Image: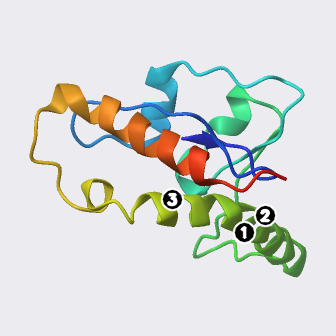
Amino acid sequence: MIADPRTRQILATAFGPGRQHDFALYQASRTPLLPRLEGWADSGYQGLQKQHAQSRTPQKRSKHHPLTAAQKAANRALARARIVIEHILRALKVFRILSERYRNRRKRFGLRFNLIAALYNYELPLN
């Protein structure tokens, strides 16, 4: 899902058959990100930096390389910016179809998700 953090509108969605890693789904969707836009992603998108130079993902620590104070501060700032996207996901999961196992026809999941996203966008206040 691609959303505008300023307006909180959902701009694009992508789906895959069955369970799929976030970054693999992004690559399979071939959704273009404009070079001038900044992409914020969680740690599941660690390879995104190679494909889109303006992307930001949190730094990961390892047992032998702990994070510095500056890296922790950068991760915290990114999390504060990304919280808007997490709030959008929470609002979508109010619809139980998205928070539980989907047991209907797989072909219709994309249609139903897009309808829920359209309802969400419709209910947003006009600024």
Q: Give the alpha-carbon distance from disc 3 to disc 2, as whole Å.
A: 14 Å
Q: What x and y, as percent, mark residue 84?
A: 69, 63
Q: Give the alpha-carbon distance from disc 3 to disc 1, as whole Å.
A: 15 Å
- Report which residue position mark 2 lands on: 81
Q: Tell me which corner region of the image, top left, top right, bottom left or bottom right, holds residue 88.
A: bottom right
- Report which residue position mark 1 lands on: 79
Q: Secondary structure at mark 2?
A: helix
**Residue visible at 77% across and 71% down in the picture:** 80
- Report which residue position mark 3 lands on: 89
Query: Label 1: few (<14), some or many (≥20) within 10 Å?
Result: some
Q: In the drawing, does residue 36 fall left or right of residue 90?
A: right
Query: Label 3: few (<14), some or many (≥20) within 10 Å?
Result: some
Q: What x and y, as percent, mark residue 57?
A: 70, 53
Q: Amino acid at mark 1?
A: Ala
> In this rendering, is residue 7 above or below 35?
below
Which of 73 and 96 lies nearest the eye of the viewer? 96
Tag 1–tag 2 contact (CB < 8 Å)? yes
Q: Tell me which corner region of the image, top left, top right, bottom left or bottom right, holds residue 11.
A: top right
Numbered circles on residues, count: 3
Q: In the drawing, does residue 75 fall left or right of residue 113?
A: right
